[in-house]
Amino acid sequence: MDIEIILINISGSDRPGVTSALTEILAKHDAHILDIGQADIHHYLSLGILIRTDSRSSGDIMKDLLFKAYELSVKIRFTPISVEAYEDWVGRQGKNRWIITVLGRRLSARHIALVTAEIAEQGLNIDSIQRLTGRMPLSDDDEPQSKSCVEFSVRGNPRDTAAMQKRFMQISAENDFDISLQQDNVFRRCRRLVCFDMDSTLIETEVIDELAVRAGVGDQVKAITERAMRGEIDFCESFRERVALLKGLDESVMREIAENLPVTEGVGRMMEVLKRTGFKTAILSGGFTYFGNYLKQKFGIDYVYANELEIVDGKLTGRYLGDIVDGKRKAELLRIIAQVENIDIAQTIAVGDGANDLPMLATAGLGIAFHAKPKVKQTAKQSISTIGLDGVLYFIGFKDSFIQQQ
């Protein structure tokens, strides 16, 4: 018996029952579906079905489908596929798959063109494209804090993965949008632990700078902080110098700062979704436990590891208790929490902005530099610089439509 392989393409206004009516005809003729894919863009249907049938039935199948397409007011097209072409397609399914996430306040045709040009340059094939964000406003005045995210699923082996990653970071920096490149494996689809830096990540300030202003040493401490975040001086050394300058500050100042912390855009939405979907969350901070615990209570965070300020008779002594949580310690804590929770390190995410976050960003399965200092952004493989912290959700693969349904 001769077999025929036919690609069926259907397009037109979408309505309930179109796919059902067409596949019912295929079922009546005992056709085998080899592949199927469907997309809906603004209520316009694009459906593709690859079938295998015997040559005696193919004519009746196409005739019945043509009549049904006419009834449904959709267009239908048939393309014969050779066995050789089908076998070649099957062989390509074994190649690596990558997820490329494009993110910004707004995405233009230029942004998409830059990304797809690099995809083509690397010899990759785009299998699917989907929008993860909801309705886009028609003008900037409608939603100044709007977000736009498109996810590409591509297949193949890049000619030079490192060069592709570098090029994405370059064009994103030059064109004010973000790009994430991740290999699409089981770990990417099963992330379970997210660890955050606190200062300038979960909150839009460096708490030690806030404390220093109240202590009258703001300029001195801020200068040390900036040098440390740029990686110009050792974090532990800078930490000791800054804490010493806080000697004599009243403990009540910490409460006042905690109650007025400027939480980063998107944190509430992100934490709600992560908690609802079973993620474990942690703060790993070179800041202070007093403020980390405040955020833990506010957002239901599972773990907080930071530095403890010594307080005697209601005053800061200028000293600290225990070991300093520096970059090396953050990476160690990430591994420890993953081990306690029985989570593979490849299933972890780390998010931070400073040089002392680099070890944990490198350790995690997915390390994201968030509105980061230049040195950190140059080193990290993924970054978010254009929107709020809920951009992490899109890197994981969440869609707005799913989030809103929960």
Image (spheres, rainbow, N blue to C red):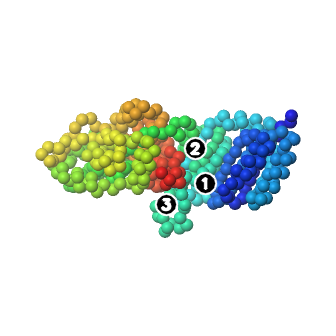
Could you say which disc has been placed on residue 99 in the image? 2
Which of these two is toward me, 229 or 17?
A: 17
Write the residue at 67% across / 50% down: 38
CA separation in Å, label 3 and label 2: 23 Å
> What element does badge 1 sit on?
helix
Image location of residue 179, percent across then percent down: 53, 49
CA separation in Å, label 3 and label 1: 18 Å
Which of these two is toward me, 352 or 12?
A: 12
Asked whether residue 57 appears in the rendered view, the answer is yes
Write the residue at 77% across / 56% down: 69
What amino acid is labelled 3 in the image?
Answer: Ser
Which residue is tagged 1?
A: 112
How packed is label 2: few (under 14 Cα within 10 Å), some, or many (20 or more)? many
What amino acid is labelled 2 in the image?
Answer: Ile
Could you say which disc has been placed on residue 146 in the image? 3
> What element does badge 2 sit on?
strand
Image location of residue 396, percent across then percent down: 50, 45
Asked whether residue 350 appears in the rendered view, the answer is no
Earlier in the chain: of badge 3 and badge 1, it is 1
**Dividing the image into 4 quarters, which one contains the N terminus?**
top right
